[in-house]
Every structure is written in C-alpha cells, then in structure tokens.
Image (spheres, helix red, strand yellow):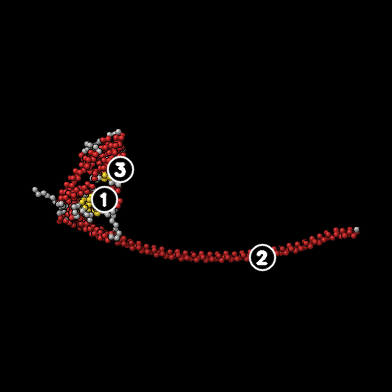
Amino acid sequence: MSVFIAIVATLIVAVPVTYFVAMTVKKSNDSKTVGKAEERARQIIDEALKTAETKKREALLEAKEENIRNKNELDKEIKERRAEAQRYERRVQQKEETIDKKAEAIEKKEAGLASRAAELEKQREQVSKLNEQRIQELERISGLTSEQAKEFLLKAVEDDVKHETAVMIKEMEAKAKEEADKKAKEYVISAIQRCAADHVSETTISVVQLPNDDMKGRIIGREGRNIRTLETMTGVDLIVDDTPEAVVLSGFDPIRREVARIALEKLIVDGRIHPARIEEMVEKAQREVETMIKEEGEAATIEVNVHGLHPELVRLLGKLKFRTSYGQNVLKHSIEVSHLSGLLASELGLDVRIAKRAGLLHDIGKAVDHEMEGTHVQLGVDLCKKYKESDIVINSVASHHGDCEPTSLIACIVQAADTISAARPGARRETLETYTTRLKQLEDISNGFKGVDKSFAIQAGREIRVMVVPEQITDADMVLLARDISKQIEEELEYPGQIKVNVIRESRAIDYAK
C-alpha cells in the first residue's frame, strides 16, 4: 500500500516536471525556427531590393537610349525638311525671276503694239480717205451711186456663187455616189416597206394588159420621151419590167392612177403613141374620170335614198370612191354609216331621212383633205355650211369624232354608226393610212418651196418628182432646190431606205396657126 502510494506520489511529481521540460524544449526549438525564418526573409528582401535597383537602372538606361534615338531621328527629319524648304525657296525665286522677265517682255510688246496700233490707225484713216476718193471717182466715171454699184456687184457675186455652189454640189454628189456604190455591194440591203407589202400593192398599183411585148417599146418611146410625158402629165410612175404583156402603174393617188390607166388603155387601142397624142388622151381620161366620179356620187345617193344634195357634194361623194382610210374605202364606209344611222334612227323613232343624210356626209371632208389645209372634220363642216345643209347634219359632221359635243340624238347615232363601221374586224388597216400620209407629206414639203409648180410622189414613196417653173428656177437653182428639199425631208419625215428627189425644169412655147 505504501509502495502504491509512493508510486502515485512519484507520478504526481514526475508528470508536471516532464510537461515543463517538454514545453521548455519546444519553445527553444520554435525560437530557433523563427530566427532562421526571419533571417531568410531578410535575405529575400535584400535580394529583391538589389534586383529592383538593377531593373530600375536598366529601365533608365533604355529610356535614355530611346530618347537619344528619337532626338537623332528628329534632327535628321528637321535637316531634310530644312533642305527641302531651301530647295523650294530657290525654285520660287527662279520662278519670280522668270515672271519678272516675262512681265518686262510683255510690257515691251505692249509698248510696241501701242505704237503699231497708232500707226495702223493713221494708215486706216489714210486708207479711208483714199477709199472715199476712189468711190467718188468711180461714181463719177460709172455714173452709178455706191448703193447701185453695191447692188450690181452683189447680184453678180450671188449668181457666180450659185453657179459655183451648184457645180461643187454636183461634183461632191458624184463622188459620194461612186463611193456609196462600192460600199453598197457589201453592206446595203434594199429598204422595202414590209409592213405594207400586201395591201399597199393592191391599193397603190394598177396593171394594164398589153396585146404583145412589142407594145412596151412603143410606150417607152424614143429615148424614153413617151413614158416621161405620160408620167409628167399624170404624176404616176410607169414600171415596165419583165412581166409578160403587162405594164404596172404605181401611185398613191387612186384618181391619178385611174387617169393614167384609162389614158394608157386608149393609147394602146389607138396605136398612135407620141407626146402630143399622150397629152390628148390624158385630157380625155381626166374628163372620163370626172364623169365617173359624178356617177359614183349619184349612185351612192340613190343607194341610201338621200336626195336634194348640192351637185358639188354629190361630186365630192364620188371622189370618196378613190379615197381610203386605214385601208377602208371611204365611199363604202359612208354608205355603210348611212344605212346604220337610218336603222338606228328608225328603232328610236327619229327622222330616218336626216339620219341617213348625216351619215352619208359625215366624212365628206376626206374628199378634199389632200388639197386643202385642215382636218377632215373641219373641212366637212365648212363644206356643209357652204352648201346650206341643216344644223343637225353640220353638228353630226362636227361631232362624229368627239371634236365637239353633239346637240341631237341623230349626231349621237352617226357617231355610233361610224364607230361600228370602222371597228368591225377587217375593216381598217392602219399601216396603209400611215403610208399614204407619208406620201402626202412628201408632196406637201416639195410644194412648199418657191418656184415649184407641182410634185408627185412615185415609186411607193422612194422618189419625189418635182416640176418647177422655168422662169423662176434656173439650172443652177435646180441643184440647190433638190438639196434643200432632200434636207427638209430628212428633218421632218421618218422613212425606210432613201428617197430620190428628181427636179425637172421644162420650157414650152405654144402658138396656134390660124
């Protein structure tokens, strides 16, 4: 027991002593470790400071080197710009010196010109005095005033210039034609009016049958005098080609073509073909066509049962047989409109007689619109007023195309009938009207020149034949006239291919042996 107590007491005393000794040893070890760590930290800090100082010195050195390099570059650039500025100043100085020299030269020239101008002015005054003396002497010698002499000289110069101009134009045209003929074989294709091929040939061409081909030579005549006379008298182009036993008459005016056809048939039957006989037969044919026109007008009035028209209106109705509008025969169109107007009027209980009369006369202006200025509506109104037609008929003619307001139901009926007749399928062909209008414009352009007696568009509009007054147009004037007409045609018309302008000057002296 005492031993146990002794052991316990020993343990109680040993444990605290042991703990104290252990703690003391531990603290001694910790203080050594901290000391080492602090010493290591001081070493690291010293190394860091040394490294930072080194880096700082290196950065300063690099900055100094960069500054030195920039300064050198700036110095170099400044030197270059200074040298360039010096070169520029030298060029400016040289230019200023050059300008000064030029200014001095100009001043010298101006001084010389001023003195020369003064001398010229003196010479001009002397020349003027001498000219006045010369004119006075010339007036005294010639017995003419200066105005009279001037007019005489201008007239002489004008005649010389006209002649020389005509000769020059002929030479240039001949040269141009030679060159054009060479090129034409390679490049030019004949311009044909394809758009009007069928119906134009039907309405612009007549065929006259011949008993034999020998008759063609007699129609042509010696050196072509017979055919030229017939073409000149009628304004129709005669085409004598390889067609067996036939001659073709070409012209856009059906009345002229009919006159030529009748005259040629009479000449063939008679057998005597020469210029005098041709003129006689053409005059007979013109009288026959005039009679035919009158008969056609009377037949139209009888067909629609319209009576009491003025004889001149009846004649104009007959002329409509030879007039087409967009390919539609105007006389047949007028008769058709008259019948339609009568039928519509009877259905509405209106005056059938007045309706037919207005329908028959609604396009009467187209009989003269190739000869007179104005639209066919205005011309028709003027004709109806001239020959004392009623106000209803006049208003129907004036309003059938909507140019003015209709004042009666009959005028509305005529307007409707005209539209029905024109709008039915196959009634009209627009290209023919455009074609004939162009031919009419060709003749109008030629007739507008001074000294032109009459003109004819032939060869389907590819030639315009111009007859001039020989007393007003000389041979030299003919060349200029042909050129002026061709220039105006080029400016005002659009056409395929080319148009030949043929100016003819013919003098005649006629007397009678009694």
| Closer to us: 158 or 209 | 209
Camera-side mark, 2 or 3: 3
| Closer to us: 469 or 233 | 233
Up-down: is 248 above or below 17? above
Q: Within 10 angstroms of label 2, few (less than 14), some, or many (20 or more) residues?
A: few
Q: Earlier in the sequence, mark 2 or mark 3?
A: 2
Q: Earlier in the sequence, mark 3 or mark 1?
A: 1
Up-down: is 285 above or below 175? above
Which label belongs to residue 143? none
Q: Quadrant of residue 35?
A: bottom right
Q: Amino acid at mark 2?
A: Glu
Q: Within 10 angstroms of label 1, few (less than 14), some, or many (20 or more) residues?
A: some
Q: Amino acid at mark 1?
A: Ser
Give the CA separation, mark 3 to mark 1: 22 Å
What residue is shown at x 55% (from left), y 64% (from top)? 67
Camera-side mark, 2 or 1: 1
Q: Are marks 3 and 1 in contact (CB under 8 Å)?
A: no
Task: Say which residue label 1 marks.
Answer: 201
Q: Is residue 225 left or right of residue 431?
A: left
Residue 128 x %, y %: 22, 57
Give the CA separation, mark 2 to mark 1: 121 Å
Residue 380 x %, y %: 25, 41
Looking at the image, can residue 338 be seen?
Answer: yes
Give the CA separation, mark 2 to mark 3: 120 Å
Task: Say which residue label 3 marks.
Answer: 422
Q: Quadrant of residue 420?
A: top left
What residue is shown at x 28% (from left), y 37% (from top)? 342
